[in-house]
Image (cartoon, helix red, strand yellow):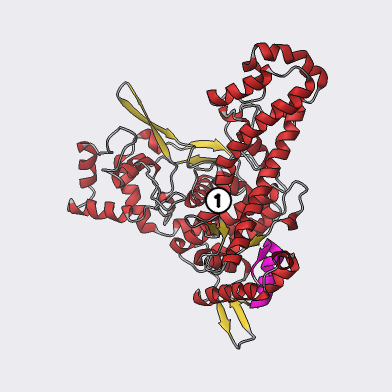
């Protein structure tokens, strides 16, 4: 990759850290995006392609009128009051029913479908009406986040990219690349999701009546967006650095097995959140391996609910080690790009005096023009003291690396933590560090994605297969195989207790059957959904 491509300012984003992140992990993941939003955006994109994983573009729906109806009385935005329907809009709605009270019943029904979002501390996210989302009981409830613009007392709406960012688009691309050479798998995913999202005709009927009454012509018009670069003028499109990673096919197989179970879309949605966020985490960590040593990514799970200190510490260290992978990859890649930009002795010495006289030119060249004034001043102070090529490659490199590392900590590591938290496979308690653990939803998703319907596998074999496939470390055998047992110097009973705890969690979730003290089987109790097309 050339330095110019790393700093081309695609999409108007000029921060160096964001540019590097896009080259490593994809354009783009966003730290503000929540687990449900990754899944919703993916479903939005798939619906917008008419359920075609091979599509090169998709349409987005505004559904402005529908959302104004559902969330009437909710806040409009910063210092903008609340959203209200006009008398004309209300009269159109009343014409749809025999009793005006029916409108309130319908509104309450849809409001109960709102997906509650929370931050890292469990506090409810404070979102305006146009940033709220609904459970996808039908494709008519899929829509993209909006933002408001007020000019000359006229309010307009456009699509928002900050929270409903590109994570779902990137996951679409992963499944697209992963099923490219397995068309039966691709068709299975497409047709199953089409069936699930078009099944509830009653909701579709109600939504169509409301939207027909309330939406203007702009709302009804589909707006198409590219999923790949189709011409030199294409600016806004999602992009993965690698298109042929074998892990994508693995993702597609796991996802297909999960959605093929005879489970309602409401229950499936929670399981999809756990599986997809975990897959995205796996992807990011794999891309963080500098030498692409896949087996180096491991997860030590605390299955004892932070009740046993040594196990909790091992799990926290496992989480920290994986964050370090991300940090080291970022800094390694930054050094590579910096050397491409500033590693030429002749070029640097020829321009050094010009940069000292006009440091803004250097800042722009490095792609740092959107840094805060305070951070720019740090760069300017350093370049003012640079009198040689060595000064530039050492001192300037250090200050710029510190600046982007700070950006990394606030953004990329927040993504890793958010994925774990929202997916139910990691998090923290106040006063402690992040660690890996397993919620019921995550346990179910992993079992369903790896064990076919009505099939079963011996408990110890299941743990070994999870260790081999994902790097999960839970019990005695995995701890000894990985070497963490010897390094920790803990009594083997700690790992045995951790293993027993996951066994109990599996049994609690109806996923484990004990035939004797020595024999326990993990099972997938669901039937296959069977035919998916009507």
Q: Is residue 55 visible?
A: yes
Residue 394 vs residue 437: left or right? right
Q: Would you place residue 358 above or below residue 133 in this image?
A: above
Instruction: Identify the residue position indicated by label 1 in the image.
Output: 417
Give percent across and percent down for residue 326.
Answer: 66, 46
Specify the farthest residue to the right: 346
Label 1 residue SS: helix
Give percent across and percent down for residue 225.
Answer: 54, 36
Give percent across and percent down for residue 370.
Answer: 56, 25
Query: Residue visible at 64% across and 29% down?
Result: 231
Q: Is residue 118 magenta?
A: no
Query: Residue visible at 64% across and 58% down?
Result: 318
Q: Which residues are magenta?
A: 458-474
Q: Would you place residue 425 above or below residue 392 in this image?
A: below
- Quarter occupied by the N terminus: top right
Give percent across and percent down for residue 454.
Answer: 58, 76
Q: Would you place residue 108 above or below residue 309 in this image?
A: above
Of 131 and 231, nearer the camera is 131
Of 210 and 425, nearer the camera is 425
* Mark 1 surroundings within 10 Å by alpha-carbon count, few (fewer than 14), some (14 through 19), many (20 or more): many
Asked which quadrant contains residue 131, the reply is top left
């Amino acid at each position: 990759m050339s330095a110019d491509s790393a700093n081309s300012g695609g999409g108007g984003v000029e921060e160096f850290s964001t540019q590097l992140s896009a080259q490593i992990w994809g354009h783009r993941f966003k730290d503000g995006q929540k687990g449900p939003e990754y899944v919703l955006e993916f479903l939005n994109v798939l619906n917008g392609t008419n359920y075609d994983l091979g599509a090169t573009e998709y349409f987005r729906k505004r559904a402005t009128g529908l959302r104004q109806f559902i969330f009437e009385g909710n806040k409009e935005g910063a210092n903008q009051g609340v959203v209200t329907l006009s008398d004309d809009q209300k009269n159109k709605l009343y014409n749809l029913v025999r009793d005006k009270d029916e409108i309130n019943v319908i509104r309450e029904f849809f409001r109960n479908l709102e997906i509650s979002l929370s931050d890292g501390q469990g506090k409810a996210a404070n979102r305006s009406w146009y940033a709220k989302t609904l459970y996808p009981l039908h494709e008519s409830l899929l829509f993209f986040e909006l933002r408001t613009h007020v000019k000359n007392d006229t309010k307009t709406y456009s699509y928002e990219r900050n929270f409903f960012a590109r994570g779902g688009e990137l996951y679409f691309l992963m499944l697209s690349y992963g099923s490219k050479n397995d068309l039966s798998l691709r068709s299975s995913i497409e047709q199953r999701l089409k069936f699930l999202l078009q099944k509830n005709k009653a909701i579709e009927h109600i939504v169509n009546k409301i939207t027909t009454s309330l939406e203007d012509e702009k709302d009804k018009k589909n707006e198409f967006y590219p999923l790949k670069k189709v011409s030199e003028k294409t600016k806004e499109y999602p992009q993965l650095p690698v298109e042929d990673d074998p892990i994508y096919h693995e993702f597609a197989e796991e996802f297909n097995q999960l959605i093929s179970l005879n489970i309602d879309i409401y229950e499936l949605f929670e399981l999809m959140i756990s599986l997809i966020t975990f897959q995205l985490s796996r992807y990011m960590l794999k891309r963080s391996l500098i030498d692409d040593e896949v087996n180096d990514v491991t997860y030590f799970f605390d299955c004892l609910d932070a009740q046993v200190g040594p196990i909790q510490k091992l799990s926290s260290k496992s989480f920290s080690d994986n964050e370090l992978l991300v940090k080291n990859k970022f800094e390694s890649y930054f050094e590579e790009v910096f050397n491409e930009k500033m590693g030429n002795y002749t070029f640097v010495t020829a321009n050094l005096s010009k940069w000292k006289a006009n440091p803004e030119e250097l800042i722009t060249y490095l792609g740092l023009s959107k840094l805060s004034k305070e951070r720019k001043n740090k760069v300017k102070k350093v370049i003012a003291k640079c009198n040689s090529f060595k000064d530039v490659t050492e001192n300037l490199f250090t200050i710029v690396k510190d600046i982007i590392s700070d950006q990394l900590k606030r953004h990329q590591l927040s993504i890793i933590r958010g994925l774990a938290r929202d997916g139910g496979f990691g998090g923290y308690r106040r006063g402690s560090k992040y660690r890996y653990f397993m919620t019921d939803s995550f346990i179910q998703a992993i079992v369903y994605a790896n064990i076919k319907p009505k099939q079963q596998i011996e408990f110890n074999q299941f743990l070994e297969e999870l260790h081999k496939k994902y790097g999960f470390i839970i019990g005695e055998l995995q701890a000894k195989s990985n070497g963490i047992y010897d390094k920790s110097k803990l009594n083997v009973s700690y790992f045995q207790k951790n293993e027993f705890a996951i066994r109990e969690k599996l049994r609690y979730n109806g996923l484990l059957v004990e035939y004797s003290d020595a024999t326990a089987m993990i099972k997938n109790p669901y039937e296959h959904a069977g035919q998916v097309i009507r």
